Image (cartoon, rainbow, N blue to C red):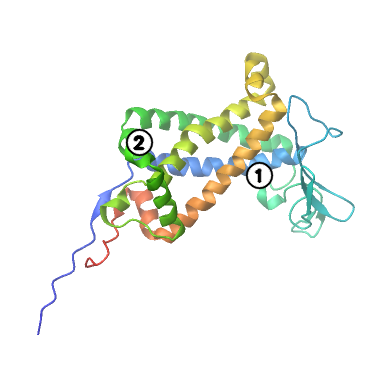
Amino acid sequence: MTDLAPATPPARVYRHRLPVRIWHWVNAAALLVLLMSGLMIFNAHPRLYWGEYGANFDRAWLAIGSTADTGYLRVGNWKVDTTGVLGRWTDAQGATKTRAFPGWATIPTRYSLADGRRWHLLFAWLLSVGLALYMLWTLFGGHLRKDLHVRRAEWSPRHIWRDVKDHARLRFPKGEAAARYGILQKLSYIGVIFVALPLMIATGLTMSPGMNAAWPWLTDIFGGRQSARSIHFITAWALVAFFFVHIAMVLLAGPANELRSMITGWFRLPPEKGARA
C-alpha cells in the first residue's frame, strides 16, 4: 500500500494593500450613488447635444422620451422602442410615468432635481478627494511602479494578443502569475484611474456655472458646456461597462478568493496545472 504525500496547503500572498482596499470600496459606493443621482439629474432634460448650447427645439444627438403610447431611445437617426424600460414605464403603484429613467434606477426614487443634485455634489467631493489621495499614493507609494507599470515586453502586440485570447477563453493565470496584473488589467486600471475618473471630474466642473465664471477656459477645452455634458454621460456609461466586465471576471476567476483578497488583502494562489491541491 502506497502512502500518499500530504497535500500542500495553497500558498497565500498579500496582494492588496490597505489603501487599495479602502479606495476600492469607497470608490464603488461613490460611483453607484453618482450614477443613480446623475440619472435623476438627466431626467430633468433627457437630451444630449454638442457645442455650447442645447434646448428643447435644438437637434439632440441622443434623446430618451415618450409619445402618447410608447417610450423611445433615439441616437442620431436611429430610434428604438423602449416602452416599460426607458421613457415610459410603470411605477410600483401602477402609475404610468414618462421620465427617461425609472425610479428604481435613480436617487431619490421620486423625481426631485434638487435632491439629485445634492446627492451628486456630496459624492462628487468624496470621489474627487479619494481619487486625489489614491493617485498620490499610487505615484509615491510604489503601487504604480510595483503593480501597474507596463514593462517593455508587455507592449509587444503578440503579448497583448495572447492576453486577449486567454481572457476570451477564460484561461486565468495560475500560481505566482495569478498574483500579478496582466497587461489588460494594467491598461484598464490605468485608464480608469488616470483617464476616465479625472475626465468625469473635469467635465462635471465644466457644467458648473460657478466654475464657468472662475475658469472659463474649461468650456473651451471641451468645446462647450453641452459637449462636456455629453462626454460626462458617455464616460459614465463606459465606467458602467467596465464595472460589469470587472464583476464578470471576478465571478469567473473565483469570487470567494477575489472578494476575500479585496477585504483582507490576502490572496490564495490557484495551484499550477498538475500540482497537488
Tell me if 146 is positioned left or right of 197 in this view: left
Does 80 appear above or below 60?
below
Q: Quadrant of residue 220?
A: top right
> How many labels sit on residues?
2
Residue hosting label 1: 107
* Disc 2 and disc 1 in contact, CB within 8 angstroms: no
Does 252 appear above or below 7?
above
Q: Distance between the Cα atoms at labels 2 and 1?
A: 37 Å
Using a 10 Å C-alpha cutoff, classify the residue at mark 1 as few (fewer than 14 neighbours), some (14 to 19) or many (20 or more). Answer: many
SS at circle 2: loop
Q: Quadrant of residue 112?
A: top right
Using a 10 Å C-alpha cutoff, classify the residue at mark 2 as few (fewer than 14 neighbours), some (14 to 19) or many (20 or more). Answer: some
- For the point 53% across and 30% down, the residue is 198
**Residue depth check, mark 2 versus mark 1: number of the one nearer the observer:** 2
Residue 267: percent from left, percent from top: 31, 53
Residue hosting label 2: 149
Tell me if 14 is positioned left or right of 85 in this view: left
